[in-house]
Amino acid sequence: MTEASPENPMYQTGDSVGIIVAHPPGHRRVPNYIKGKTGVIERYCGAFANPEERAYGMQGLPKRHLYRVRFNQTDIWEDYDGPKADTLDIEIFEHWLKGDKS
Amino acid sequence: MSPHQDHDHDHGHKEDGSPLNYADDSRHDVDETSHYPLMVEAIRQLLVEKEIVKAGDVQERLDFMDSRGAEIGAQIVVKAWTDPDYKAQLLKDGSKAVEEFDVPMGEAVLVVVENTDKIHNLIVCTLCSCYPRPILGLPPDWYKSKTYRSRAVNEPRAVMQEFGTIIPDTVTVRVHDSNADMRYLVLPARPEGTEDWSEERLCELITRDCLVGVTVPSAN
Amino acid sequence: MRQQNDLGGLPAGDLEIIDEDAAPWAKMLTAIHGAIGSRGHYNIDMMRRSMESLPPEKYNLPYYERWMAGILILLEETNLLTRAEIDERMEKIKAGLEAKK
């Protein structure tokens, strides 16, 4: 695994990424509805202390890379009742992403 | 029942005994005004006595809360509408651009998303109720409700319709689930026919609801 | 496996478009909470986690009542105030108010 550092975000705008399917205990900020879905990096948001650890009083360091990921609504919801062009943006930390080369 | 029920009132039951489903921030049906104000005052007194917080700091925060609202949001929007350079700055670095309006974003990052004739933005926080408080103040009850948090992501158009807002199919609806350190503000599209309007008049068009994205400003 | 705060996409009824001014106690609680946080005793992530950890009957309380439950956990956890101290002070304030009647 590439060590995340402020200089080394793993992904760039336009990269296709999948959200990992995982259910670790504790404080997580990845909603169930997005797990396992594939989207595109809309932008790199910066490096932030990990809230999953800060939630328990730890420092959450080293900082982790955060991205805004854009999804087609029709890729998220089987029965999405709206135009195919509708999208959803959400912020996801790098350790919840896997590159999608498809 | 947990062992701490001694100080908990019997919340959340209708007259017929069936449970109310709170977390919708609806009006309180049970008179609990004595319990919570008492508890808050006890906490306040103790924290101040122990010098954990300063009374002045708490008051400042109360005053600050009261000073926030749609007016500040409207001023930001009107400046963006009338000053293209400012609009560019606002879209590029929202936190920095709003400093001049006395908006301290602190650790949160403000992202301003622009409505156009092709895109309409809607803001929600499904996991809790993140909201651009340094600009808009306290979020409204409906924003914090389970219903909004559940449906804004998978039924945004239906949700907006409940506010009387219909977005044509030719316009893409873009939902933002603000689940991390970003806070979002919608920059509504300037209504047609307002080219000659004064800034004051333009400000009146902009409501809190259109800064969240559930409505659009109308010049009618 | 879904956490109780993870609501996105769950079935839900019609919106109740309620927008009432928060009660004075709720605003005061918000101000106190902010003041404690600004001193570094706890942070937003701890607050979110605290509320997520509430038993369902407390998570389903109205918004500020839920906040109170979350804050009480953090006050104990960070050794700022105990529930016993708070209860004792509440009794004292109440007695004082009743004495005035």
Image: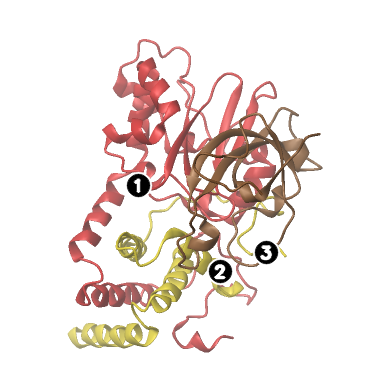
> Which colour denotes chain B?
red
Relative to C85, does residue A49 appear above or below in the rendering? above
Q: Which residue is mark 2?
A: C59
Mark 2 residue type: Tyr
- Pick whichever, A27 or B72, lies toward us: A27
What percent of the width, then of the height, locates residue B134? 35, 45
Relative to B75, does residue C54 appear above or below in the rendering? below
Q: Which residue is mark 3?
A: A24
Chain ID of residue with mark 3: A
- Gap between marks 3 and 1 measured at Cα: 30 Å
Chain letter, brown:
A
Question: Tag on residue B128?
Answer: none
Of all residues shown, which one is farthest toward the front? A2
- Gap between marks 2 and 1 measured at Cα: 28 Å
Q: Residues within 10 Å of mark 1 (few under 14, many from 20)?
A: few
Mark 1 residue type: Gly
SS at circle 2: helix
What percent of the width, then of the height, locates residue C89? 28, 84
